[in-house]
Amino acid sequence: MTSMTVHEAAQALREQVVADRRHFHRNPELGFHEYDTAAYVAERLRALGIEPQTGVAETGVVGLIRGATPGRCVLLRADMDALPLTEETGAEYRSERPGAMHACGHDGHTAILLNVAEVLMQRRDEIKGTVKLVFQPAEEGPGGAKPMIEAGVMTNPEVDACFGLHLLNDHPVGTLVVQGGPLQASADEFELTVEGVGGHGAAPHQAVDAIAIGAAIVNELQRIVSREVDPLDAAVITVGSFHAGTKHNIIASRAELHGTIRALKPQTRAFLQRRIVEIATQVAAASRATCDARINTLYPVTVNDNAMAAFARSVAEKLVAPEQVITAPPVMGAEDMSFFLNAAPGCYIFLGSANHERHLDHPHHSPLFDFDEACLPLGIELLSQLALNYLGQ
């Protein structure tokens, strides 16, 4: 039992959470290779008296805080993986691993949840039920949430609710985006392989030009969103890579196109997938070629439960000024927190992390990305209070 308030406990951990974040930032690891990160997390949990379950979905870590009395179970989630980028911030705590960088804030998420564990262990006697701490690998791809769920993370004990947060440089420090409904888009990939007939660049009539056909497919795919999707319904189709050809005077026999699909409604997602396959194969057939069209289904839409969002908002408004708890348009970026939210009602919250005066406002996934660490204690307080209030209902 502690005499400190949750706010005081979170503020007391300011130096520790910054040190944790900087340790993770210096030592980034890519998805399903977070071995050192997982070992650090597990060691810290053991030091707090929490026996971790390691190796969940390769490198995931799960810890249980069992309260003094039985009750419901709430899951708190943080993602641990970095991105394949070379850092350009020049920060004192910059990445020491070339080609890997925490450019999305996951180092902050992991540090926050580790320190939430400490706050909650200090108050273990007042917890009714169980807090399940989930440190997830591979959010950036290919996705660690789904294999963690398949490994049984939502059971033993059964999870009744889930919460998580994401630092966001779209909003200043101290801002909390809390809302129900769709928050982030679904994400899928497509791979198109056009097979034509190669030939001499001076005799196109003797060949079937895979580059020309691939270009026609790109143009037609853009028409799906502009002419087949309701203008009020958000959707994105982006062809991100187009590889074909070897020499200026050789007509390519093969072209490979890769892209991403984003939507905010499941029915729109299904429509986009179907139309991409139809258009790609039919455009190719009309030009005497073939197209092998493959859709790789990745993350569903991230949807916050309305009742849980209202609960989270009521908690958030007690931590910061009411005008700092806002709503915002959904973003077309994707998150595999969506799998947890599909398995149990919950709310995913954006925590503002930008400081424009200190130039800590570069976009996520930029080699210049960094955030204002002043947001970290608020993250600790928010997740701790959500767990305590939910279990205390």
Image (cartoon, rainbow, N blue to C red):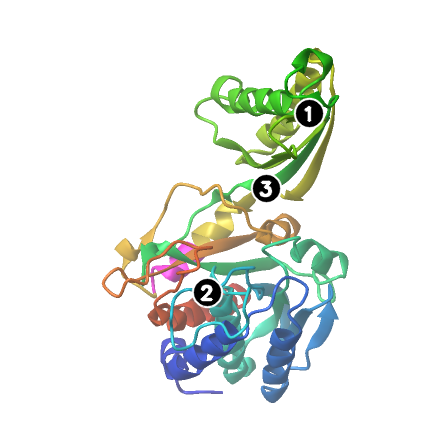
**Could you say which disc has been placed on residue 252 in the image?**
none
* Residue ID at (59%, 41%): 187
Gap between marks 1 and 2 measured at Cα = 37 Å
1 or 2: tag closer to the N-terminus: 2
Q: Which residues are magenta?
A: 312-318
Mark 3 belongs to which amino acid?
Ala
The image position of residue 326, as x and y in percent, is: 33, 50
Q: Is residue 67 visible?
A: no
Gap between marks 3 and 2 measured at Cα = 26 Å
Q: Residues within 10 Å of mark 1 (few under 14, many from 20)?
A: some
In screen coordinates, is 148 left or right of 90? Answer: right
| Towards the viewer: 38 or 114 | 38
The image position of residue 305, as x and y in percent, is: 53, 47
Q: Is residue 314 magenta?
A: yes
Q: What residue does disc 3 label?
A: 187
**Could you say which disc has been placed on residue 277 in the image?**
1
In screen coordinates, is 388 left or right of 359? Answer: right
Mark 2 belongs to which amino acid?
Glu
Indicate the secondary structure of the residue bearing disc 2.
loop
Q: Is residue 137 visible?
A: yes
3 or 2: tag closer to the N-terminus: 2
